[in-house]
């Protein structure tokens, strides 16, 4: 059994690529400032695999005309743009540092929030904000104060940038083809420079939250979710491309039991790896105390997943 850790991000959505607040505003937290010392700490604790989100919700994947736009009550994507050159150079730099540290990387291409309804600096309605943020229910104390703070934050987003709103890259055949060619394949090509540094490539994190299926809660309505057959096609095609480049493909599910609700003919591509990635972390939970405190919550979010096979 090998020990792995979820070190999801330093800046959700813009660890890789140009700094979105080019004209001032939010202060950058460069992963380059801390990653070498964190990798050294991981190695001392016996961690050999690190999971890291790359493009997250798509915030840094096209702005202006290349960003999603509102069309009625939906967000649409006219085209999937090429990755910004700095996304590629930043990712290559990360791989080089992992190779030097002799630790393997499990990159996560996109998060499920990639396909959430779009959120930009003009998104001030309660419904959209409740999709993206944890807000007290109507009638609860502090709800209005919470909404005011969130609207102030959202208003500070840079012009032309959109979080989410990119479900077309999964559900639309033309946009999906562009996504593979302009986003997935370039990052896989960079990964081939460091084949021993990649443990596996994760296509998407927690796709069940944006997929139409019975018996699953979540923040999206059924009409805002992607039909199951379209999601399965995206997973089948994406994992096949990852395998084409010689890497092990995987998908990160909230719970391995979700696989039982999906078609076996599609899930068989994932079943061999995903349950083992998600399982057995309790056996290694004691190692958490030995890891640097700030690194365990570097992204400020998810539970740490330990116990990579």
Image (tube, helix red, strand yellow):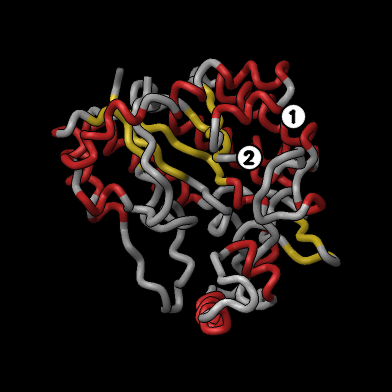
Picture layout, residue 297 above or below residue 229? below
- As drawn, is 79 to the left or to the right of 20? right
Q: Quadrant of residue 221?
A: bottom right
Instruction: Say which of 132 and 289 sits in front.
Output: 289
Instruction: Say which of 294 and 160 sits in front.
Output: 294
Report if residue 170 is visible in the image: no
Q: Tally the marks.
A: 2
Specify the label residue 207 is tagged with: 2
Q: Secondary structure at mark 2?
A: helix
Residue at the disc numbered 1: 233
Picture layout, residue 221 above or below residue 21? above
The residue at 24%/31% (across/down) is: 47
| Badge 1 or badge 2: first in the primary sequence | 2
| Of labels 1 and 2, the one closer to you | 2
The residue at 70%/64% (across/down) is: 65
Picture layout, residue 279 above or below residue 14? above
The residue at 52%/48% (across/down) is: 55
Q: Quadrant of the N terminus?
A: top left
Specify the label residue 23 is tagged with: none
| Residue 210 on image: x %, y % | 68, 46
């Amino acid at each position: 059994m090998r020990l792995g850790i979820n070190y999801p991000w330093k800046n959700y959505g813009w660890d890789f690529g140009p700094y979105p607040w080019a004209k001032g505003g939010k202060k950058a937290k460069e992963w380059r400032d801390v990653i070498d010392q964190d990798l050294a700490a991981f190695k001392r604790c016996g961690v050999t695999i690190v999971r890291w989100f790359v493009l997250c919700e798509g915030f840094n994947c096209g702005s202006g005309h290349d960003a999603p736009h509102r069309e009625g009550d939906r967000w649409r994507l006219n085209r999937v743009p090429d990755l910004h050159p700095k996304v590629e150079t930043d990712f290559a730099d990360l791989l080089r540092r992992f190779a030097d540290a002799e630790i393997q990387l499990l990159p996560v291409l996109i998060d499920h929030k990639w396909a959430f309804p779009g959120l930009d600096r003009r998104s001030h309605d309660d419904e959209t904000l409740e999709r993206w943020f944890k807000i007290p229910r109507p009638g609860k104390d502090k709800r209005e104060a919470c909404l005011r703070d969130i609207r102030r934050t959202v208003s500070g987003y840079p012009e032309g940038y959109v979080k989410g709103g990119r479900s077309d890259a999964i559900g639309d055949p033309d946009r999906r083809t562009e996504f593979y060619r302009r986003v997935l394949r370039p990052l896989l090509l960079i990964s081939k420079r460091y084949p021993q540094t990649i443990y596996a490539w994760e296509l998407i994190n927690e796709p069940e939250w944006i997929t139409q299926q019975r018996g699953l809660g979540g923040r999206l309505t059924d009409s805002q979710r992607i039909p199951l057959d379209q999601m399965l096609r995206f997973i089948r095609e994406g994992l096949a491309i990852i395998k084409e480049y010689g890497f092990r493909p995987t998908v990160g599910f909230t719970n391995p039991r979700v696989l039982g609700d999906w078609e076996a003919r599609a899930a068989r591509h994932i079943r061999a790896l995903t349950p083992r990635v998600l399982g057995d972390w309790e056996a290694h939970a004691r190692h958490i105390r030995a890891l640097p405190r700030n690194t365990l919550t570097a992204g400020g979010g998810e539970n740490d997943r330990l116990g990579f096979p």
